[in-house]
Image: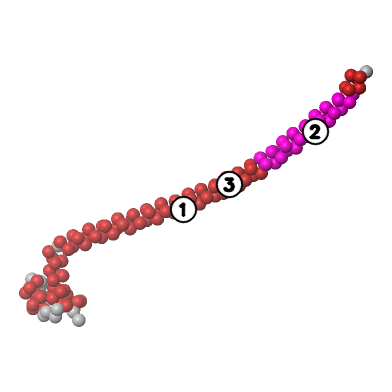
Amino acid sequence: MDSLSSIVVVTPLVTLCLFGLLWWAHRRHTRQVSALKLLFKEQQRQIADLKSQLHEMRCGALGVGSRVQQVEGQLAQAMERQEELAKVQHDPQSKLYGHAMKMIELGASIDEIIAECDLPRAEAELLVSLHGK
């Protein structure tokens, strides 16, 4: 009966040890699950923040794109105006009018303007009345 009494004593001890081990494993598992839940919530928050930032970037990019199109349109208009001005400057008639206006600024008479710029009297008088002092 000696072995039977040792079995009676050892069995509750082994059971108690196994129960303690199971309790420790369960507690450890519960802590890991809690930590994973916290990590999951943090990652969900980060994903929401990133989605918000992405939305803001998309809206900003759309705003920049429309602004670029607007500036390109203004640039095209400015280039057209510049080409028109270049054409006007190469026009011999506009050079004569420019020269006539310069003469008016310097105080030339209508007769001097007519002689130098080969303009009709009516045009010379009109220039003097418009640009004279």
Residue 16 lies in quadrant: top right
Of tags 3 and 2, which is closer to the observer? Answer: 2
The span from disc 1 to disc 3 (Cα, nearest Å) is 21 Å
Left or right: where 65 falls relative to 75: right
Q: Which residue is mark 3?
A: 46
The residue positioned farthest toward the left in the image shown: 115
User: Which element carries disc 3, helix, strand or loop?
Assistant: helix
Give the camera-side residue of 52 and 46.
46
From the top left corner, tell me how far across and down residue 123 is, in percent: 14, 73
Counting residues from the N terminus, which is met first, the one under dot 3 or under dot 2? 2
The span from disc 3 to disc 2 (Cα, nearest Å) is 39 Å
Of tags 1 and 2, which is closer to the observer? Answer: 2
Q: Is residue 57 above or below residue 91?
A: above
From the top left corner, tell me how far across and down residue 107 is, in percent: 14, 80
Residue 70 lies in quadrant: bottom left
Which residue corresponds to the image point at 50% horizontal and 52% vertical from the top-left? 56
Q: Is residue 63 above or below residue 14?
A: below
From the top left corner, tell me how far across and down residue 83 is, in percent: 22, 58
Please give the label number shown on residue 20.
2
Q: Amino acid at mark 3?
A: Gln
Query: Looking at the magenta stretch, what is its main secondary structure?
Result: helix
Q: Which residue is mark 1?
A: 60
Which residue corresponds to the image point at 11% horizontal and 79% vertical from the top-left? 108
Q: Amino acid at mark 2?
A: Gly
Mark 3 crowd level (few <14, some 14–19, many ≥20, 10 Å Cα) = few
Of tags 1 and 3, which is closer to the observer? Answer: 3
User: Which element carries disc 2, helix, strand or loop?
Assistant: helix
**Which portion, as a residue range, is magenta?**
8-36
Residue 106 lies in quadrant: bottom left
Contact between labelled residues 2 and 1, with CB atoms less than 8 Å apart = no
Counting residues from the N terminus, which is met first, the one under dot 1 or under dot 3? 3
Left or right: where 46 falls relative to 63: right
